[in-house]
Amino acid sequence: MADRKLTNEKMLTFDGHEKVGTFSAAAKLTEFGEKQNAANEVLALNINDLIKRVCALEDQQEKNKEIMKKIASEMRELKNEVDRVRLTEKLNSGAIERLDRIIREAEENS
């Protein structure tokens, strides 16, 4: 398999405007056709490689979507847990303050 890299040189299928005689026209046309075929082959190889890369990127994108959905779900669960802990801490702090106030009042009254 030939080098796949696209270059201007490889894509150049017509390289001159010199007069072509009747007897050399067939040879020039054959030369042009061969160059065009080679250019088409390089283009086809590059296009096929690009198609493979796009397909691989699409597959990876689908995997990334699933990973992101899982992360989002875990983040929601974590937020709910943090909110629960905050509420518990707030309720506990309020209860401790009330108990402390009741104890102080009881000590003052005794």
Image (tube, rainbow, N blue to C red):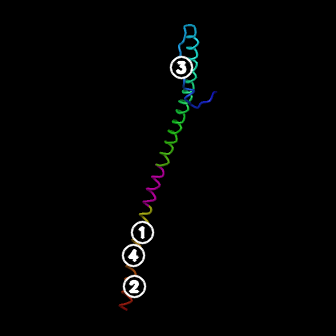
Q: Is residue 75 above or below residue 38?
A: below
**Which is nearer the N-term, disc 2 or disc 1?**
1
Q: Are marks 2 and 1 in contact (CB under 8 Å)?
A: no
Amino acid type, mark 2: Ile
**Which is nearer the N-term, disc 2 or disc 4?**
4
Quarter that holds the N terminus: top right
What span is in magenta?
69-80
Q: Are marks 4 and 1 in contact (CB under 8 Å)?
A: no
Amino acid type, mark 3: Gly
Say which residue label 2 marks.
103
Secondary structure predominantly adopted by residues drawn in magenta: helix
Say which residue label 4 marks.
95
Whole-angstrom CA distance, mark 3 to mark 4, is: 94 Å
Q: Is residue 2 above or below residue 89?
A: above
Judged from the image, the secondary structure of the residue bearing numbered disc 3 is loop
82 and 43: which is toward the camera = 43
**Residue 88 image label:** 1
Judged from the image, the secondary structure of the residue bearing numbered disc 4 is helix
Amino acid type, mark 4: Ala
Whole-angstrom CA distance, mark 2 to mark 4, is: 12 Å
Judged from the image, the secondary structure of the residue bearing numbered disc 2 is helix
Q: Are marks 3 and 2 in contact (CB under 8 Å)?
A: no
User: Residue 13 appears at what percent x and percent y?
Assistant: 54, 22
Say which residue label 3 marks.
16
Whole-angstrom CA distance, mark 3 to mark 1, is: 85 Å
